[in-house]
Image (cartoon, grey):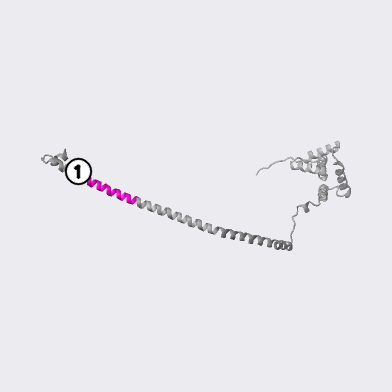
Amino acid sequence: MECRYEPRRIRSKRSLQAELNTLKAAQRQKDGVIAALSVPDQSMEVLQRLWMGESIESIYETLGCDKNEGHTTMSQPATNVLSASSSSTPTQALSGPQPAMELTENVTAHREEETPNHEALFQPRTRTPESNAEARFSRSPSITEDNTQTSREQSVYASDLSPTRKCHRTASASDYKKQMDQIEFMRAVKLDIEIRNQELKKERAELWHQMMAAKSALMGHADCNHPTINAYVT
């Protein structure tokens, strides 16, 4: 177990007064920025700066500079709103967060009064079931007429193309059959030629053997004195 000694902060009346002044200044800055949001010329700029992450103090300082220089007319609405919020109820001036809440409500009410028709512009049209039924029944004859017209056109187109398709199918089938018949015929011819070639080779071999046998026989009789054999051999 560890014991730690921490110095006690002594808060004097002066420190409390300084802290109160700081809180009042921060609240004053917030009230000024909220009041600037109610001005149409300043609202978009302030919103953009808040969106970019700029601090309220810097925004309030620039708004105060603009007010002193006279470039904008933001000072009067801000002071009017602040005076109205402070003079309306004296008991509310003592509490800190209540003026900011009232100012935000005033700003939102003012912006809603400026743009009353935005929601009406962006709201979609609501159709009742009766209007939907009437629209459906009013459109149904045209849809049925279109469907019947397309079905008739498809039937006419199919009836016009059916003979030609049949002719093309029969022609393609006959061409395929002719091609297959020609292929079978060529195969049969090739087989016959191969068989005939084998037979001719066998006949040639037999004739060759017969010729060689006759030649050997004649060569055996070469020594005889027969004039025909001698003339054939020589």
- Amino acid type at mark 1: Met
Outermost residue, left direction? Answer: 225
Range shown magenta = 190-214
Q: Is residue 12 above or below residue 174?
A: above
Determine whether, in the image, residue 130 is placed left or right of residue 214. Answer: right
Q: Nearer the viewer, residue 37 or 24?
A: 37
Horizontal and vertical percent position of residue 199: 27, 49
Quadrant in the rendering for residue 45: top right
Determine whether, in the image, residue 231 is placed left or right of residue 118. Answer: left
- Main SS, magenta residues: helix
Q: Nearer the viewer, residue 196 or 60?
A: 196
Q: Residue at x 74, y 43 (%)?
A: 51
Q: Is residue 195 above or below residue 224?
A: below
Q: Which residue is mark 1?
A: 212
Q: Residue at x 89, y 48 (%)?
A: 87
Residue 193 visible: yes
Q: Nearer the viewer, residue 134 or 221?
A: 221
Instruction: Give yes or no for residue 207 being in the magenta stretch.
Output: yes
Q: Residue at x 37, y 51 (%)?
A: 187
Quarter of the picture holding the C terminus: top left
Instruction: Give yes or no for residue 77 being in the magenta stretch.
Output: no
| Label 1: how many Cα within 10 Å (few below 14, some 14–19, many 20+) | few
